[in-house]
Amino acid sequence: MTDLETRLRAALHDHTDRRSVDDLLDGVRRDVARRRRARTVVVVAAAVASVALVGGGVSWRHRTSSPVGHPAGVAHRTMAISVDASGTAFKVIGNQGCTRPCSTLWKAGDAGTWSRLATVHDASRGARPYGPILSLEMAPNGDDGWAWGSRLWSTHDGGVTWAAVTTLPGGTDPDRNDLDVSAGPSFTWARMARHGAFQLWRTPTGRDAWTRVRVPDHADQTIAAVLPDSRVAIPIRSGGDDYQRQRSHGSYRMVQHYYLGDGTGPWRRVTVRCLPQTAPFRGRAQKVSICGPGGHRVGAGELVGPPVTDGSPRFRDLFFPATSTGETRVNPLGHENQIHLGNDQAFLVTPQGAVPVALSIAPTPGLVDIAASGQHLVILTPNDQILRSADDGRHWSALG
Amino acid sequence: MQSTRRQVVTFDDFVHARFAGLLRFGRALTGDEDRGADLVQDALARTLPRWDRIRADDPEGYVRTVMVHRNISVWRALRRERLTGEPPETAVADRVRDQALWSAMRQLPPRQRTVIALRYLADQTEAQTASLMGCSIGTVKSQASAAMQRLRELLTDPEEDR
């Protein structure tokens, strides 16, 4: 063994910095919740095109996010955002202006000025530095909403008053039950892990009259995306979103199969085969394979990955400039568009191509959260800045 | 409720038991403590929803595989910014570290760093490394050779050792 090899082994086996495993586990569970939303965009893309129940002008309001996330231990920062169909933005801030664990909820209308709506307290899980609420979902009407973290709350008056939800099993302890809520215009869905299995519940949006919905066998425990017509999409466990090994040559691919339905009739199966994220390679001519929210691939340079879909639209290759550093970041937004946040320029990527957009902020390395409702979009940056667009991402303004 | 608890506890137990090793692997893949921890978190977040399926079949291998692929392909696009208003508990300067080597490691391309991590930390054979990375054994050899050559250059040229 050479000196360099010896030196390498010693360095690689050296102790790492001391870290809290509990903080990491908290982060893992927050990432799992956020990642569910990221994948829903792909589901909607396939569903919109393949089922043809939703006509032109589809607006899909389920938010998505790149897995940037806030680290544990961040107080007084925005933890989640949402937006309704009128463009009113909502945000949750952790432990601001309170002496015991709290989350404050705010909204910003057309004028862009934040006004405080409510403060929610919950000391049941101890003094978490980011407050009791980690996620927020406002319905398109802006009146109904659900917030969850250490437990689940709902509002039916635009966020002014919030009440803990106790009618939903696990609602008193959703954090541990792996809860996620997705609001559609007619129905709102809740997905949770219960007794080791996936459970799906729904309620008419505007009420907390939750009823359990039968799910197909092999439905996964991860996400439940809501379409504009309030149907829900669920990944299929067997062959669902996963790294699948190509045993012949040792590589992996990601394949996604979903059930789509409203819970009252049969579930339809839809399939998407491509990565829902960027895959940058070294060099200025990047290879990018993305399963875009519109069902198309977006790329610069040579495209990689299998372009085959079952029942979903044919992929189209779109091109946008590579960033100067050789990295690219694309974050899904609405049902068709994506925002590409490069180090020196942001681009809006649409099925027609890519156009530069001014975000009115310094280029950001990623997003903490994204919410969309029709043409209205809001994004939360790691610098705690919130930007809003009223035209599907073409123009942005900062919310102060 | 019992099975839910068992699932959570088992996953948590796994993370507790393998935490240090996964952090080392993440650091080796990325060349950086923080990014390595983020990579671990990212991989575990992809593992948790599938825990029931993989826990009986080498879950650590699954996590490491996800880490390798995420680091090579998509991770750089998704890395998170670490925000903290608090200083680290332990001053880095207090640690005995081969900073020059780690600085050189960070300048390697991700694939070369991955080969180094798999060969010299995980003690994988060339065939195992090739299988894990989804490439040929020849590619592993050439990547390893290039990585070692580049490390030698960087470690003997202090101007390049940023």
Image (spheres, grey):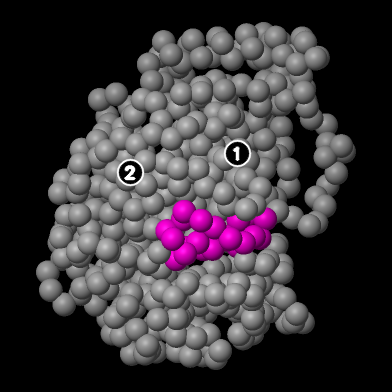
Of the pair A338 and B20, the residue shown nearer to us = A338
- Is residue A383 found inside the magenta-colored segment of the image? yes
Same chain under badges 2 and 1? The reply is yes
Q: Which quarter of the picture shows residue B103? A: top right
Q: Which residue is mark 2?
A: A352
- Is residue A316 found inside the magenta-colored segment of the image? no
Q: Is residue A394 left or right of residue B150?
A: left
Estimate the x, y position of residue B98 in percent, counting from the top left: 77, 25
Q: Which residue is mark 1?
A: A343
Q: Is residue A173 left or right of residue A363?
A: left
SS type, badge 1: loop
Residue A286 drawn above or below residue A66: above
Q: Is residue A385 left or right of residue B68?
A: right
Instruction: Name the residue type under label 1.
Output: Asn
Disc 1 is attached to a residue of which chain?
A
The residue range painted magenta reads A376-398
